[in-house]
Image: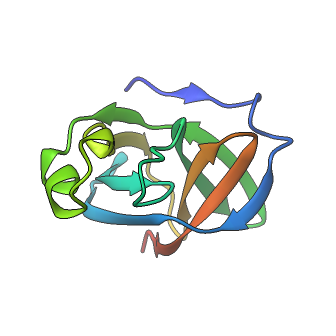
Amino acid sequence: MPRRLVEGHAAFDMRPGGACNFDQVRVSADEVVSSGWAIRSVDGSPADAVLLQLDVAGNNWRVVANRNERSDVAVYYKNDALRMSGFTATVKQQAGMNVKLLRAFEGHLYVCPVEYVVP
């Protein structure tokens, strides 16, 4: 289950903005696999990195998601620069875990308006 912890983004301030979606969330007894897409803006600004912020009982941490190609997003927004906007991340399953999607861009973290809670 590859994942990278993100100490380098810890000091970034959080802002609203951009567009994103969790297309699929699979929860098993041991892990949660999330996939979808995330962009900083539709005008050609892909995120530098896509992160998941995991909150459980007042404790939180962030992991970097793996990036993958999403030609459908580039076609929808008519912008080929957004082709690598896909992500996939696997994390250990914890009941009650709240998962937020963040995009790093130019020293800031942009918070996605969608999130989910693991039952």
Q: Is residue 118 above or below residue 62?
A: below
> What is the residue that sits farthest to the right in this orientation?
11
Q: How many marks?
A: 0
Could you tell me which quadrant the N terminus lies in?
top left
Residue visible at 69% across and 46% down in the picture: 61
108 and 101: which is toward the camera: 108
Q: Which residue sits at x=66%, y=61%?
A: 55
Horizontal side of residue 15 vs 100, given as left or right? right
Q: Is residue 117 above or below residue 59?
A: below
Residue 87 seen in this snapshot: no
Please say if 71 is above or below 24.
Answer: above
Q: Is residue 70 visible?
A: yes
Q: Could you say where residue 32 lies in the image, as x and y percent from the top left?
A: 36, 51
Which residue is depicted at the point 72% across and 54% down?
60
Colour option used: rainbow
Give the percent coordinates (x, y) of residue 21.
Answer: 34, 66
Tell me: 22 left or right of 80: right
Dividing the picture into quadrants, the one containing residue 22 is bottom left
Q: Position of residue 34 (x, y in %)?
A: 33, 52
Q: Is residue 24 left or right of residue 109?
A: left
Tell me where residue 70 appears, x and y as whole percent: 19, 45
